[in-house]
Image: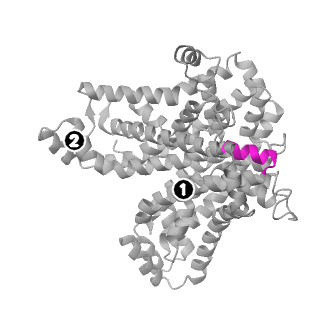
Amino acid sequence: MMQAALPAKAAARNPHLPFGKWGLRVSALTYLIMMIAIPIIVINIEGLRGGLDQFFADFTRPAALSALWLSIWTAAVMAVINIIMGTLTAYVLIHYRFPGKRLLDSMIDLPFAIPTLVTGIMLVLLYGPQTAVSGFLDRQLGIRILFAPPGIILALLFLGYPLVIRSVQPVLARLDTNQEEAAYTLGASGWLTFRRVVLPVIFPAMLTGGLLSFARALGEFGSIVIVSGNIPMRSQTAAVYIFGQVEAGNMGAASSVSVVLLLVSLVVTLGVDFAYRRKTYA
Amino acid sequence: MREKPVNTFWAWVLIGIVLLYAGLLLIAPIVAVIGGAFEKGIQPFIEAITAPDALLSLRLTFLLAISAAVINTVLGIIVSWVLVRHQFPGKWFFNALVDLPFVVSPVIVGYVMIVLFGRTGWFQNLPIQLAFSVPGMLIVTVFVSLPFVIREVMPVLASLRQEQEEAAYTLGASPWTTFSRIVFPAIRHGIIYGVILTLARALGEFGAVAVIGGAIEGATETATVYIYRALLDRNNIGAYSMAIVLGLIAVGILVIMNRLRPNERGH
């Protein structure tokens, strides 16, 4: 709140800046509108250009619906696993000292740095049909990883791993240890302390990170086009479907699925933004 | 300190689960790709990576990433400044816009460019060709890597105390002098971190540049598009070798990130 009050005062004290101030503001906002708002408006106009009936007809085709549904459910499964494992990783990193800790902590950002297409290739090499791992899973347990939903979820887990950890870690680090210790002293078990004292504090950060990884996963393309094998109705996600339709020149099909996919990710991100970021910078 | 030596059975179980998960998820795939590229020794790897089209695609990737980083750094600093220091109606909306490139599918971004500038697009008679060309690829690369500098610089700028700036103004310093002498040094760290993230994102972009670039060999083929084509052509060594090169760049970026990362995580 202090930050909100200060700039107005500072601006009032710097009368020699009217042109600079407006110049900066206009260029910043124009940049954001041109680069981000306009593309999003364009895709919506293009998607709805043929009328609502055409829009519904296009995205309710079986292949389109199944691609959208596959994107949504694999992203949701990933988000749930990622929230649990990401929180656990952040907890362990903050609370314990153990061999390999530094390496683990520095490896966590790797998915931010590595191109997602390379992620796809790494998973194909690890779980591809010719490898020992997948041979065992396929023959003994009848589980196929590549060219099937488990491969998609694995790729998404890789991409999303840092998001929950980097969201929860700072909150855990700032958490008041006194409360935790008090709970222990009063005889609460580790689990009870976590559930009653730690969890309520870190829950918003867990949810923010999880939702962000969900929204990010919905549109993922590079890794999935490699691991999914692109089989319509079985392992074709929405982004891969759009790519195929654009290549084939079916603009109507590409646009309508884009609009739906965009709508879902917009609702999720704007929700997160509205709930948390707004408090920080508004 | 809060960091405890591990003393209970359950603590070891938790650590074991995390190490196993991270090992399977992060480390096993890297080992696999290194194994794949060097399967037949180092010679084929060198040959694959020095093939003319491979080198050309790497050059284009660097050209796009560096240009996008320059654009997004300059404009990113301006956007951060305006979003933190200025008060105006609808600010929350612009602030929310910044996050969108992170979640909008890159395929959709490339597709929007086709809708606007493609063969049957809305604007066909422009002086520069944007579809299936490098300028169009630069625009989508700028889009996908737009949030990073802004999201790193904004919190630093917001936490900056303004007494020094006001003192500088009072002593008659120009806005530019005040910025370059006082504000810039304070936010420099955030900017560098943001630039690194921008570069990483831009170097690895695939979906958007593949759609708008049209994957024309030797002209609009980036390193990632090269990998994709190599896989389709069953040139596995070529694909894995280029993947290793991009992976090594990623590891380099990761090392720099770890050096620079603000030490805020309680250790």
Per the model, the C-alpha gap separating discs 2 and 1 is 39 Å
For the residue pair A63 and B1, the one nearer the viewer reads as A63
**Start-end of magenta stretch:** A239-250
User: In terms of secondary structure, where does tag 2 sit?
Assistant: helix
Q: Residue at x 54, y 75 (%)?
A: B175
Q: Which mark is residue A193?
A: 2
As shown in the figure, which amino acid type bears the numbered disc 1? Answer: Ile
Magenta stretch: dominant secondary structure: helix
Circle 1 residues within 10 Å: few <14, some 14–19, many ≥20: many
User: Which residue position holds label 1?
Assistant: B191
Circle 2 residues within 10 Å: few <14, some 14–19, many ≥20: some
Q: Quadrant of residue B136?
A: bottom right
Q: Quadrant of residue B127?
A: bottom right
Q: Which x, y percent locates residue B176?
A: 57, 72
As shown in the figure, which amino acid type bears the numbered disc 2? Answer: Thr
Please say if B267 is above or below A270.
above
